[in-house]
Amino acid sequence: MNPARILLVEDDKMIASGLVYAMEAEGYAVAHAKTVGEARRLIGEAAFDLAVLDMQLPDGTGWDVQAALRPTDTAVLFVTVVDDEGAMVRSLESGADDYIVKPFRLRELLARVKSVLRRRAGGTGDTLTLDQVTINPIKSTASIHGQPLELTALEYRLLLLFATHPGQTLTRVQILDQLWDGAGDFVEDNTLTVYIKRLRQKLGDAAAIETVRGVGYRVDP
């Protein structure tokens, strides 16, 4: 099987060299660009499975690179120092698959890269892990250290949604849309708050559902 091809667009040489090394160690084929112009050239020369885009670049922004990628089926993960809720929401609404804010843990970035590539490939594998929780998408079960986690259908789908978007802030609208599409039931905004509370209680210390004020929720891997 050919390795996944990743386009990394990052103008900081030290950060870029570390990311290239780490991703190549994971078995990915990585091409690095420092500017929007270099990224456009690489996009014209080869196809990529995923683009990891720094938001602020010397000659533009990550959105400019994303625009050049739109004719392709390349997944997009934004890396940004702009810890701004509006920018995060705009990134997701513009079609990005995920984003991560600097400074970040390398393990978290690699987990998100793996998750985005897995989702784009159309599969979830045998199991998913979210902190101390193990999810089996095939059997629709979840456990904590081998102990079964008793969840309702909607609680399970909510947990699975967080597991397939590790570390990503999901807006309430995104979550409600997924619960509607997945379960076929109408879930009101107020009802979502109740389900979040119930899921938190059942997870305990095994995984923390963080509230991102004014945006939604996030669970770190």
Image: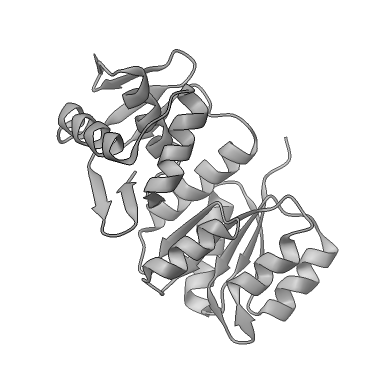
Q: Which color scheme does this rendered protein use? A: one colour
Residue at 36 percent across and 71 percent down: it is: 83
Q: Quadrant of residue 196?
A: top left
Indicate the position of residue 161 as horizontal and vertical percent values. 42, 35
Residue 131 appears in view: no
**Number of numbered discs:** 0
Residue at 31 percent across and 48 percent down: it is: 217
Q: Quadrant of the N terminus?
A: top right
Say left or right for 73 vs 197: right
Residue at far right of view: 45
Q: Is residue 31 above or below residue 124?
A: below
Indicate the position of residue 187 as horizontal and vertical percent values. 38, 31
Q: Quadrant of residue 71?
A: bottom right
Q: Nearer the viewer, residue 12 or 166?
A: 166
Residue at 23 percent across and 22 percent down: it is: 145
Q: Is residue 217 above or below residue 92?
A: above
Q: Quadrant of the C terminus?
A: top left
Residue 68 appears in view: yes
Q: Is residue 32 above or below residue 76?
A: below
Say left or right for 80 vs 221: right
Q: Nearer the viewer, residue 104 or 101?
A: 101
Q: Is residue 108 above or below residue 59?
A: above
Residue at far bottom of view: 58
Q: Nearer the viewer, residue 90 or 161?
A: 90
Say left or right for 160 vs 55: left
Indicate the position of residue 115 as horizontal and vertical percent values. 51, 42
Say left or right for 109 vs 5: left
Indicate the position of residue 177 as horizontal and vertical percent values. 48, 38
